[in-house]
Image (cartoon, grey):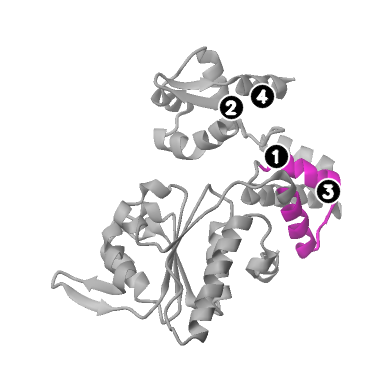
Amino acid sequence: MNEQTANQAIPQSLAHVIGQRRAVQQIQTALDAYFNDRLDGVFKAFPHTLLTGPPGVGKTLLASLINAELGNDANHFHEELAVNLKTPPHVQGLLLLADEGDVVFVDEVHELKPQTTLYRCLEDGKLMLGGEHRTLMLPPFTFVGATTHEFMLQKPLRDRFRIIVRLEHYQDDEIIQIVMERAQRLGWKVADGAVHAIAIRGRQTPRIAIRLLEAARRTARAKADSAITEEHVIEMCKLEGIDHAGLDSLERRYLQILKEAQGPLRLNMIAIRLALPRQTLERVVEPELIRMGFVTKCEQGRLLTGAGRRHLLETKS
């Protein structure tokens, strides 16, 4: 799958986005207002926008679609990860790339360390340069930030976003539609049983479901089969250690440690047992297990729920 084919498989406009109806409607309303203002002779940039929600639900896609809906091509979309912007000059360098009407997109913006660098830029378009307090007026541009941890943003920065769009996990029927549409756009034959098997394991997250679709196709093509079947999905999951709920071996080990503890267990003890940093568990592993109802928190630590115990029993059977 080359880059051009991959791009064709991705929605090219808000009208083609599946799910996230409230978020899409919110953005579309803002776009309609923006273009109507322009027709009335008011020329200004599209409002700075914050996209917040769990990983893999389409924040980057929506940021690129805002750029496209504004009539911009890819050259007017400046994208960067916040972790790569380690100093104020790094942030300033990114902002200086923007011409009038451009979109500057920073993913995981809560990781941005010099958040104060953005205050004046988002407030009144002024960029403070160097220790001499020199001020540079930036052309009208749109700053789009995406975050999985909205409240890790400093409040003065968060309050400067004029539009805040909150994304949610998808419904199972939406995941099914996304998988089927992606396969069709790529020209892949996929059986209905395979689509449903992927959706069940997709954890209501398009990014995960699409990854499983691609892995299932590799399994099919390894056998020289032209169509992806449910058997290919099951074989792929066995190969990758993914169970019927979409959990991997690390997540099951986490649950097993809680089961063996027979009571609340502190996060640092779980981290030691798994030989992983505490932050990795807290930010990456735990949120999904808690959302799925397998783990809960209390003052004494983490507890395995009844659903978590049943899942371990079902996985062994």
Contact? badges 4 and 2 (CB < 8 Å): yes
Nearest the camera: 285 or 27?
Answer: 27
**Mark closer to the chain start, 1 or 4:** 1
Alpha carbons under labels 3 and 2: distance apart: 36 Å
Q: Considering the numbered disc 1 on the image, is that residue within a helix, a strand or a loop?
A: helix
The residue labelled by disc 3 is 223
The secondary structure that dominates the magenta segment is helix
Q: Secondary structure at mark 3?
A: loop
Q: Quadrant of residue 4?
A: bottom right
Extreme-bottom residue of the structure:
41
Q: Residue at x 44, y 35 (%)?
A: 282
Spatial CA span between label 2 and label 1: 15 Å
**Which residue sits at x=38%, y=79%?**
140
CA distance separating discs 1 and 3:
23 Å
Q: Is residue 68 above or below residue 246?
A: below
What span is in magenta?
Answer: 175-202
Q: Horizontal placement of 117 versus 80: left or right?
A: left
